[in-house]
Image (tube, rainbow, N blue to C red):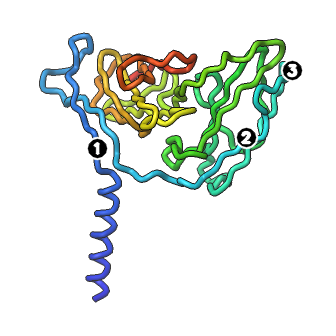
Amino acid sequence: MNKILTLLFSIFLFSACSSEKQRVNEEVVEVPATIDAPTADAPKVKFYQYEDQAAYPDAILELFTPLGQQVFKPGKVPFEFNVKNFPFELTATKEFKLFNILNGGDPVGFYSPIFQRDLKQGSYRVVAYLVDEEGLALKNFGNYVDRDFQVGESRPIPYSAEPYLALNYPRSEQIYEPGSEVIIDFLVVGGDMKLDGLKVQIEVNDLKYEIDHMAPVRIENLPPGSYQVKVRLLHSSGKELEGPFSSVSKAIIVR
């Protein structure tokens, strides 16, 4: 009886894990002549997502400092967050759980919710977010926060009511091994993709893919080479939003 129960549990566990990794919205794209595919019968490039359930949907990230449009002297600028309903304690792997993006740049990870960053004079927009065990951004309301502030004598970033993008992956000049998944992980901040009629267009050189909700997009079988990844936030009509952070571009390498 114990063996039967163990077998049934194993089947259930396998089925659960398999269902978590079920591919959805898979799209096979033809590799243009501008990309050097090894052979004519090389594996097809595929864009897809996994039908995963969101991790830590109740996690809350609050930003106490900076305040909106707060002005700091050049140098050490304090950041203070409060984290709720999320296992923020430092693990043995010492993986970052909290990330900051300044003005659309690459994310920077932090072990503590209270820290300082050395900043020069300028206008800044910070997007802060929590990540799951895979390092992917949590995407439920309250999992991320944004704020504008200034350092030194600088003008505020022009106000715009339009949503905009924050790109978690890929990072600038990120290198992937052939055969590994390339992940495009983004947040749409300040809006709701469904309610606002938005979509995200992903271009990897001449390859294109569109998605109408926030989810990590994975790319399989990308041939070795250098690529420019462009992520654009568009209206459903195809028109690009006009805000300063409505598009992000990163260079990656597969080798």
In this image, 228 relative to 81: left or right? left
Q: CA separation, marks 3 and 1?
A: 48 Å
Question: What amino acid type is highlighted by mark number 2?
Answer: Leu
Residues 76 and 69: in front is 69
Given contact means CB atoms under 8 Å apart, are the residues at marks 3 and 1 in contact?
Answer: no
Question: What amino acid type is highlighted by mark number 3?
Answer: Lys
The mark nearer the N terminus, 2 or 3, is 2
Q: CA separation, marks 2 and 3?
A: 19 Å
The residue singled out by tag 1 in the image is 24
Residue visible at 44% across and 26% down in the picture: 175
Q: Position of residue 4 (x, y in %)?
A: 26, 82
Please tell me the numbered disc located at residue 63. Answer: 2
State the residue lying farthest toward the left. Answer: 41
Q: Residues within 10 Å of mark 2 (few under 14, many from 20)?
A: some
Please tell me the numbered disc located at residue 73. Answer: 3
In the figure, 236 relative to 54: above or below?
above
The mark nearer the N terminus, 1 or 2, is 1
Residue visible at 68% across and 39% down in the picture: 110
In the figure, 141 relative to 103: above or below?
below
Residue visible at 28% across and 39% down in the picture: 25
Q: Position of residue 100 (x, y in %)?
A: 64, 33
Q: Residues within 10 Å of mark 3 (few under 14, many from 20)?
A: few
The mark nearer the N terminus, 3 or 1, is 1
Q: Secondary structure at mark 2?
A: strand
The N terminus, quarter of image: bottom left
Q: CA separation, marks 1 and 2?
A: 34 Å
Q: Position of residue 213 (x, y in %)?
A: 40, 37
Q: Quadrant of residue 245?
A: top right
Q: Position of residue 226 (x, y in %)?
A: 38, 16
